[in-house]
Amino acid sequence: MTKISTSRFSDSHLTQDPRYYLSPNRLDIGFKLLYLSLRDQAPLFAEKLYKKHIKAVTHGTEVEFDDKSKNNSSKFMSSFNKLDYNIKLNSFDKRLSVIPLAKDFSIANGAHRLSILIFRSILGDYYQPLDSAPLKFNYQFFSANGFSFSEIVAASSFYINYCIKPRLFIIWPSAPDTIDYSRFLPNVVCSHQLQLNHLGAYELLRCIYVDEPWIGTSSSIYGGISEKYFACFATNRPVKLYIIDGSSISDKDLLDMKTNLRETIGIGKHSCHSTDDKKDTIRLFKQLFNEGANCFFNSSSAQALSYRKEIYNTIQSELININQKINLDDLLVTGSSVLSMHGLRKNLDIDLLSTKYTSQLEKSLHLSSHDSQLQYYPNSIHLMLNDPKYHIYFKDLKVVSLNCLEAMKIRRHEFKDFSDLKLIRRVKKVNTKNPLSFFANISEKILYNTIYLRYSVAKILRQLLPPFSIKIIKFVKRKLYAS
């Protein structure tokens, strides 16, 4: 096995870029970056997670070990705000303090100071190596201290956004579950699993390889995916997902990590996949690291995919028509469109929630604001937009979670809500069982039989035809599916 170097810097040279001092064993910095980023637009959410993480890292005492006057989370928060204001005005004065580093060059103290330097993009020689052991406030620590998956994802998202080189590693179900994959994957920021049915597996492959010409087009039902599907999903085990911080790992060593994994598993490229850049990592992190991802992917019938495409394209074209520079992160798809995107029924219109674009949406013929219904939602618009518990992603578009929509319809209690609640509960019930133990619906069975037929034909041709003929067939197939 190739030895992978994860050394952060040489002992004789420390970088001035504070982002390089991010380390997965200090996910508490992700919570602090979340607070700095959201304290104005979603203050209740930001303050709740900040105070909760302070209680965790002080082991329940809420007392600063070197400043006993900071003896509750509110005082920590007040001190943090004052420190940020001071650094914003006067920058960082290393004559007053430096940030100590542990043996692995992660910070040994000064998490609040480092978070501000990262948030404000302040470069400088502010770091002092020590011979102390690293602290361990990683995602397992926060999980063990009562943090929900969504709360850990929220902090991880800010960590990843500021991280120099985040990467996603995917272990396919065809890989054995007897291997400890963490041995091959250093610097894990967070992990997740997806239990997918045949529809979900097919859509996940399409989502991951969306820019690859070999997968084909919608008109060919993405026929190029068929062989990959059967090779990667040979068992009903879950898809394992790992986000790693590759900032201290060279591109060559990242490639060697993937090679080592594939050699150990022994089934080649169909054992694992990894992203190659930050943009793709963030795109997939948003769509996959979510409580509603299982249900959304497993609901990817042909009808649902058609509705999703129609809704997404309509929103894009309407935003152009009303000539507004609207940030999609500030919009939330809701109402019947959510049901359509899960393949439950056709939407009558496209309802959106927003914190700042209500008047602009009224100018559109096909988009409408749902802000008048906010009183029925169980949470504020700011919380639904910023807490990953209350939304999922389709591409770069936020969609209200089924649980959130269900709660709204229960509270609103209109006649049309009764039939919608039956649809929501039906799809949720299907996804609480093992989705691979049976065909969830006719669409899934049709898709499975279609791709199985393609796979079987390809397998027979490989056995009957000489190697040069197979190359010709592959060439023709790529041309047909890419057209």
Image (spheres, rainbow, N blue to C red):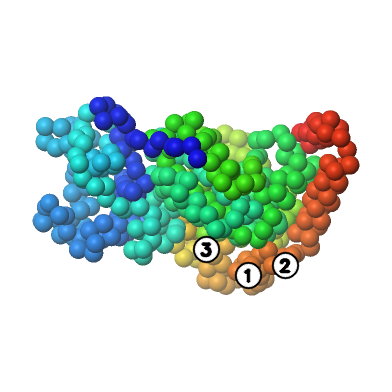
Left or right: 13 with respect to 96? right
Q: Mark 3 and mark 1 in contact (Cβ < 8 Å)?
A: no
The residue lying furthest to the front in this view is 1
- Gap between marks 2 and 3, in whole Å? 27 Å
What kind of element bears circle 3? helix
Is residue 161 in view from this perspective? no
- Residue corresponding to mark 3: 404
The residue lying furthest to the right in this view is 464
At label 1, counting other C-alpha atoms closer than 10 Å, the crowd grade (few under 14, some 14-19, many 20 or more) is few
- Quadrant where the C terminus lies? top right
- Residue corresponding to mark 2: 438
Please tell me which of labels 2 and 1 falls first in the chain: 1
User: Disc 1 residue type?
Assistant: Lys
For image coordinates 51% across by 36% down, the residue present is: 256
Q: Position of residue 209 (x, y in %)?
A: 65, 40
Q: Please give the count of numbered marks on the rendered protein.
A: 3
For image coordinates 64% across by 53% down, the residue present is: 174
Q: Position of residue 482 (x, y in %)?
A: 76, 33
Above or below, 16 against 130 in this view is above
Q: Mark 1 and mark 2 in contact (Cβ < 8 Å)?
A: yes
What kind of element bears circle 2? loop
- Residue corresponding to mark 1: 433
At label 2, counting other C-alpha atoms closer than 10 Å, the crowd grade (few under 14, some 14-19, many 20 or more) is few
Above or below, 108 against 445 in this view is above
Please tell me which of labels 1 and 3 falls first in the chain: 3
User: Disc 3 residue type?
Assistant: Cys
- Gap between marks 2 and 1, in whole Å? 10 Å
